[in-house]
Image (tube, helix red, strand yellow):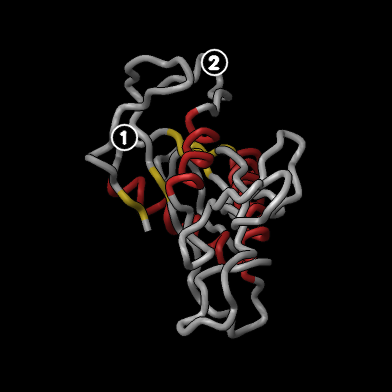
Amino acid sequence: WIKEVNGGPQVTGCGAGASPWQPLCDAANSGCTNTDNTTEALRYESQLGEILRAAKIRWPNLKMAFLASRIYGGYAPLTTNPPPVSPEPYAYEYGYSVKWEIQAQTNQIRTGTVDRVARDLNYNNGTVPWIAWGPYLWANGTNPRSDGLVWCDGQAGAPCNGEIDFQSDGTHPNAQGIGKVSNLLMCLRHIPLGFET
C-alpha cells in the first residue's frame, strides 16, 4: 500500500530549497469489488486507518501525513478483464473517505471516542501520525474546477485541446497527468506554523 521512493527523497519545488521533510506517498485504493452493504467510501476509510497505523510502525518518527483524494476515474473502460481498479464513482467517493478519516481523528482527540470504521487514530500516544488534507486531486473530467484543473483523455477543443492525462488503462496518470499531480502536491503550503517535528 505504501511506496518508498528512493528511501524518502528530499522535497523541493515551488521555490523551496532543500528540505528536511521526507514524503510518504500513499497510492492506496481498495481494489475490491464491493460484496456487502458497506459503501466503497467506508471500506477505503477503514483501509486508510490501517495504512496510517502500519506506517507509524514502519516509520516510528513519522509525525504528519497529508491525505489526498484520487484523480478522476471516469475514463477507465468498464468492460476490461480484470475490471478497472476504481473507476467512477469510487474515485470521487474516496474524497469523502479522506474527509471522514480526518474528522474521525479530530473527534477522537477531542472526545476520546474511537471511530468504528477508521478505528484508533490517536496521534498523542503514537498510534498514528497527525493527519490533514493533502492536495485535492479529483476534478470532474473536462469540467474545470474553480482553480481550472481538468482531467483530459484526448478530447478536442477547450479545455483539453487533445491533451491526454492518462495511460491506456484510463485509470493511471501518464507523464502529463503525473505532472499535474506533482504540481498540486509540491505546491501544498498549509503546514501549520510552529508545528514541532
Is 118 left or right of 61, judged from the image as shown? right
Q: Which residue is drawn at the image coordinates 65% and 66% (left, top)?
A: 88
Q: Which residue is mark 1?
A: 61
Q: Residue furthest left?
A: 7
Asked if residue 112 can be seen in this view, the reply is no
Residue 193 percent coordinates (x, y) = 54, 15
Q: Which mark is residue 193?
A: 2
Q: Which residue is drawn at the image coordinates 29% and 46% (left, top)?
A: 4
Is 43 left or right of 18, judged from the image as shown? right
Asked if residue 167 can be seen in this view, the reply is yes
> Which quadrant would the C terminus be assigned to in this image?
top left
| As drawn, 169 above or below 33 | above
Name the foreground residue: 116 vs 38: 38
**Where on the picture, by quarter, is residue 19?**
top left
Name the foreground residue: 164 vs 184: 164
Residue 189 percent coordinates (x, y) = 55, 23
Mark 2: which amino acid? Leu
Residue 138 percent coordinates (x, y) = 64, 49
Asked if the residues shown at circle 2 and circle 1 are in contact, with their CB atoms under 8 angstroms apart, the answer is: no
